[in-house]
Amino acid sequence: MNALLSICLILFSSHVLAEEIPPPPPLVTLEGEVLETRDASIYTYVHLKTAKGDAWAAVGRSALAKGDRVRIEKAMVLHDFKSPSLKRTFRTIYFGNLGAGSETHAESISSPK
C-alpha cells in the first residue's frame, strides 16, 4: 500500500510541476541599422532602426559603429530591464548574439580584462 501511495504521489507531483513551469520565451532575430552604441561591462548595447521600428539590443562586446548593418540572432526579449552600469531602464531590450553577415566597420573586440 505504501509503495502504491508513493508511486501516485510521484506521478501526481511531477504532473503538477510540469504544468507550473511555463515554456521558455521564443528566441527572435533582429536586423537593422545601428543608430548608436554604448559599451558597458562585457556587453555592447545597440540602438537599432529595424523594419518594425527602433529597438535596443545587447550583444557580447563588439566594435560597432553608427551606420553598420547588423543581425542579432537567438535574442531573448526582456521588459523593464535595469542596467546599473548605464544607469537606465530599457522598457524592452533584446539580448542575443551578433550574427554572421553583419556588416560592421570593425572586427569584434575581446572583453575587458
Image (tube, helix red, strand yellow):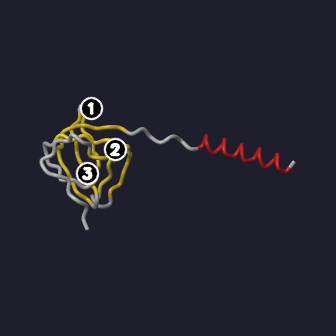
Tell me the quadrant of the picture where the C terminus can be found: bottom left
**Residue type beneath disc 2:** Thr
In the structure shown, which secondary structural element does the residue marked by tag 1 occupy? loop
Q: Is residue 55 above or below residue 58?
A: above
Residue 49 x %, y %? 21, 38
Of the two numbered discs 3 and 2 in the rendering, the one whose residue sits closer to the viewer: 3
On the image, numbered disc 3 is attached to which residue? 45
View extreme (right): residue:
1
The structure residue drawn at horizontal position 17% and vertical position 50%, both measured from the top left corner, is 64
The structure residue drawn at horizontal position 24% and vertical position 38%, both measured from the top left corner, is 54
Reading the chain from its start, which is encountered first: label 3 or label 2? 3
On the image, numbered disc 2 is attached to which residue? 92
Residue 111, by quadrant, is bottom left
The structure residue drawn at horizontal position 12% and vertical position 47%, both measured from the top left corner, is 105
**Residue type beneath disc 1:** Lys
Residue 92 x %, y %? 34, 44
On the image, numbered disc 1 is attached to which residue? 52
In the structure shown, which secondary structural element does the residue marked by tag 3 occupy? strand
View extreme (front): residue:
100
> CA gap, disc 3 to disc 2?
12 Å
The structure residue drawn at horizontal position 21% and vertical position 40%, both measured from the top left corner, is 101
Q: Relative to 95, is 54 on the left or the right? A: left
Residue 85 x %, y %? 29, 61
Q: Is residue 28 above or below residue 62?
A: above
Near-viewer residue (110 or 61)? 110
Q: Relative to 100, is 20 on the left or the right? A: right
**Residue type beneath disc 3:** Tyr
Q: Relative to 24, is 78 on the left or the right? A: left
Q: Relative to 105, is 55 on the left or the right? A: right
